[in-house]
């Protein structure tokens, strides 16, 4: 029986510092892609979304491009609401709308 060879990614993920950095960057990527999708689906420009969410165009652009560090939950909620979405926390049969 031979051992399955690990991929480069699998080997790298064994390193705690690599794994932590990957997870942080992946979360930033997912957030920026979510904002891009919301904007695309609702045909919102950066300026229009900024106006409707009460945020500056610079903040919207930075969030959309993944350059905004430490995104505030309130900013994400405002963007979601401006695009007609709600943010919901769900656990088992319990739901909380933000």
Image (cartoon, helix red, strand yellow):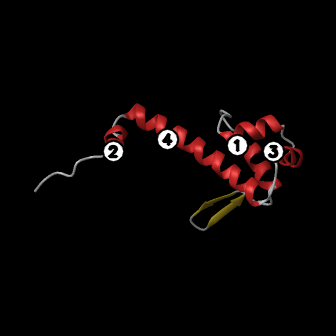
Of discs 3 and 4, which sits in the foreground? 3
Could you tell which of marks 3 and 4 lies nearer the N-terminus? 4
- The image's mark for residue 64 is 1
Real-space CA distance between mark 2 and mark 4, rounded to the nearest whole angstrom: 14 Å
Of discs 2 and 3, which sits in the foreground? 3
The residue tagged with tag 3: helix, strand or loop?
helix
> How far across and down, in percent of the image, does residue 77 sit?
75, 50
> How far across and down, in percent of the image, does residue 64 sit?
70, 43
Residue in view at x 35 percent, y 34 percent: 15
Of discs 1 and 4, which sits in the foreground? 1
Check whether the beta carbons of the residues at disc 3 and disc 1 lie within 8 A of each other: yes
Residue that carries the numbered disc 3 in the rendered image:
46
> For this view, does 43 lie left or right of residue 64?
right
Could you tell which of marks 2 and 4 lies nearer the N-terminus? 2
Real-space CA distance between mark 1 and mark 4, rounded to the nearest whole angstrom: 18 Å
Could you tell which of marks 2 and 3 lies nearer the N-terminus? 2
Residue in view at x 66 percent, y 34 percent: 67
> For this view, does 84 lie left or right of residue 24?
right
The residue tagged with tag 4: helix, strand or loop?
helix
Residue lying furthest bottom in this view? 93
Residue that carries the numbered disc 4 in the rendered image:
23
Q: How crowded is mark 1: few (under 14 residues within 10 Å), some or many (20 or more)?
A: many
Look at the image and tell me whether residue 83 can be seen.
Answer: yes
Q: Residues within 10 Å of mark 4 (few under 14, many from 20)?
A: few
Quarter of the image where one finds residue 54: top right
> For this view, does 4 lie left or right of residue 42?
left
Q: Give 13 or 43, whichever is nearer the viewer.
A: 43
> How far across and down, in percent of the image, does residue 62 sit?
72, 36
Check whether the beta carbons of the residues at disc 1 and disc 4 lie within 8 A of each other: no
Residue in view at x 32 percent, y 41 percent: 8
């Amino acid at each position: 029986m031979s051992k399955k060879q690990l991929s480069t990614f699998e080997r790298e993920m064994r390193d705690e510092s690599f794994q932590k950095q990957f997870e942080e960057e992946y979360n930033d990527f997912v957030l920026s892609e979510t904002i891009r999708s919301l904007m695309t689906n609702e045909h919102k420009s950066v300026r229009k979304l900024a106006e409707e969410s009460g945020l500056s165009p610079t903040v919207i652009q930075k969030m959309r491009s993944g350059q905004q560090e430490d995104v505030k939950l309130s900013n994400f909620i405002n963007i979601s609401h401006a695009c007609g979405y709600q943010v919901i926390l769900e656990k088992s049969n319990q739901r909380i709308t933000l």
